[in-house]
Image: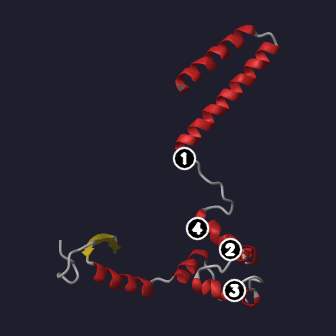
Amino acid sequence: MLCDVCHKNIATVHLTEIINEKVVEMHICQECAKLKAEELKEQLSISDLLGGLVGMGPIEKEEKALHCPSCHLTYGEFKKKGRLGCGKCYATFKVQLLPLLKNIHGSTHHTGKAPFVKEKKKSREETMKGLRNRLQRAIHLEEYEEAARLRDEIKNLERKDK
């Protein structure tokens, strides 16, 4: 397939653009892809994106004076570059970063995510532990019918694990 832009080279990059709610697919060569990347860099800067997400207006006077004690990055430089200089920047710019992180991630607290298989296994382990605790309690209270039912339930779950 030839490049949709230059019609000379073989298309190795495939782009999908949405322009005015219309999907446009482009198949372009490596050289045209480089030109397209440069064009996109000029159109969209990370600082514009970050500024738009947080709704940051002009930098306040105290924000201008705010800088990281470790790498000396100022808050204004962060707004321009869209990147922090070091790990201490997170603490230095905490007040300004929290609304940004909440807007991007939906939370300011990292909760992580376990793979589905691991979650399922963990859930099963917790279930078994709970059943064993209930079994011990039933034996202690001399509720033997309940204990027998719980024992059978534990055995069924153990068989399923194998």
Mark 4 nearby-residue class (10 Å; few <14, some 14–19, many ≥20): few
Q: Dot 1, how many residues are within 10 Å of its Cα: few (below 14), some (14-19), or many (20+)?
A: few
Q: Are marks 3 and 1 in contact (CB under 8 Å)?
A: no
Hey, what amino acid is under mark 2? Leu
Along the line of sight, the residue nearer the viewer: 125 or 46: 125
Mark 2 residue crowding within 10 angstroms, few (<14) / some (14–19) / many (20+): some
Identify the disc placed on residue 97.
2
Kind of residue indicated by mark 4:
Ile
Give residue 73's mark: 3
Question: Which residue was labeled with disc 1?
Answer: 115
Splitting the image into 4 quarters, where does residue 151 fall?
Answer: top right
Label 1: which secondary element: loop
Using the image as rendered, state which of residue 86 and residue 59 is in the foreground: 86
Discs 2/3, front: 3
Disc 3 and disc 1: Cα gap in Å? Answer: 37 Å
- Which of the image's four quarters has the N terminus? bottom left
- Look at mark 4 in the image and give the residue it sits on: 104
